[in-house]
Image (cartoon, helix red, strand yellow):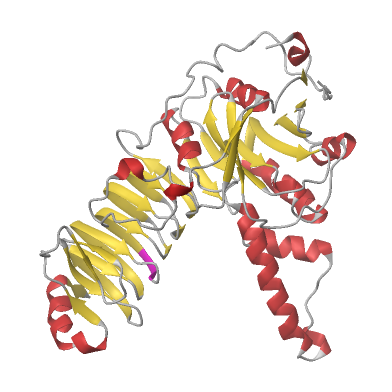
Amino acid sequence: MSFLNKLGIGVGAGASSSREVPRSMGSSGRTRSNGSAPVAAVGTSRSPELGESNRVSNGLKEFLWNLEGLGRGALLDLGPAWQTTLSFFIERGFRVSSEDLLRAWKEFLVDEEGKLREAAGRAAQHTLDVTPSARAARFLEANLQYPNSSFDAILLWDLLDYVEPMVAKQMVANLTELLRPGGVVFAMFHSKKPEGFQRYRVADSTTLQVITSPVLCPAQRVYQNREIQDLFGRYRTMKSFVGRDQLRESLFIK
Amino acid sequence: MWKKEDVKTQVVRENATGFSTGSPTSPSGPTRETSTGLPVSSKASASISQGIRIKGEITGSEDLFVDGHLEGKVNLSDGSFTVGPNGEVKADIFAREVIVRGRVDGKIVGREKIQLWSTGNVAGDLQTERLVIEDGAVLRGRVEIETGRPIDKRDEARGAAAGSSKGGVISVSSGSAAD
């Protein structure tokens, strides 16, 4: 780790090679049986439209460093259930919970739209409360339902960029309750509005795979450093790494 | 309560309305095609096809393929339980192997293995020896690997994190490095 990294100023994250995903691994032409599939092939396949690149991640390295010696810690992964990410942490003794919160947010938005259409056809007293705080409360009533202090680590990824600011605020508050004292959150923030939509998975201890995916939700806002610090104001420490791709990786320790 | 024998009895009677029985072996190989063109394990001796709804408890020791709606409890001690792409199961599932291509709302215990295909969507905890997750599968729940380890193990730069500098105290800091 460089001197700058020791000071909390990371350099060089995002320097990486990229490659196109083999298109031959799509779903077409799959011939395996249900019961006795050659499972070694499963979990490595890709949808044909996906692209993938590797990204050196000082944030991940630091995240893992903070979790060393934890033993059977509990981790909450708020990204998609990738085989590689789950395997990575399970092999290191973690009990992993997975909840794709951005997908849940997308489903929530679709559901809300339906409710609004329904409400429009009813009497005024049945209208839906669409204030940001009410929407945030409704979303979080159905998601992130775990006992307090359940987790030692949380992979938040770049989720906060894509949800409404009020949801982000209440979500961070909820996550803080779910985290044990000394627990770590790994989050990412775009320093400029992202052009595409990406999801992330752990390739190894220092590398993230960046998966280009169809847009699930449009980015809501770009958080400035001060706003990020305010969001995570209850955390003891914060450390950030900004890469050449303008993606900021942040660690927050409760 | 549903027993395997009961299912078989009804399968014969209800064959024309959606249940189907399958020969345990197929002349063309280890897999066969259902009427919907879906590959089914050669061992699958019973299936509940799309459009069928069942409420109750299913117990047995053979394989079962569900492409319809099932609510209750599934206990196939030695069998494989497959949820087809159209299948919706609200049940705790206990089986030797569980393959999910549709939706499951409930805890899944696959004694030997659980496979989530890309179309699979599970809301519930998973408990198994081996877990296979295809890209695109949706999981909302806790994963418990009882023994062994999940497959698809990758070569990783083990110890890279351990080799990183540990001397620095985590500081309240942030910054950018426009390298």
Residue at 58%, 40% (x, y): give it. Answer: A52
User: Viewed as shown, does residue B77 lie left or right of A165?
Assistant: left
> Which one is nearer the viewer's eye here, A52 or A204?
A52
The stretch in magenta equals B87-91
User: Viewed as shown, does residue A58 lie left or right of A129?
Assistant: left
Above or below, B74 relative to A168: below
Question: x, y percentage for residue B23?
Answer: 11, 70
Which quadrant holds residue A247?
A: top right
Above or below, A144 relative to B39: above
Please, what is the dominant secondary structure of the magenta stretch?
strand
Residue B129 in view: no
Residue A110 in view: yes
Residue at 15%, 59% (x, y): give it. Answer: B29
Residue B88 is one of the magenta-drawn residues = yes
Question: x, y percentage for residue A176?
Answer: 70, 41
Please state, as top left, top right, bottom left or bottom right, where the C terminus of chain B lies in the image. top right
Residue B6 is one of the magenta-drawn residues = no
> Which one is nearer the viewer's eye here, A224 or B111?
A224
Residue at 56%, 52% (x, y): give it. Answer: A49
Please state, as top left, top right, bottom left or bottom right, where the N terminus of chain B lies in the image. bottom left
- Counting every numbered tag in the picture gives 0
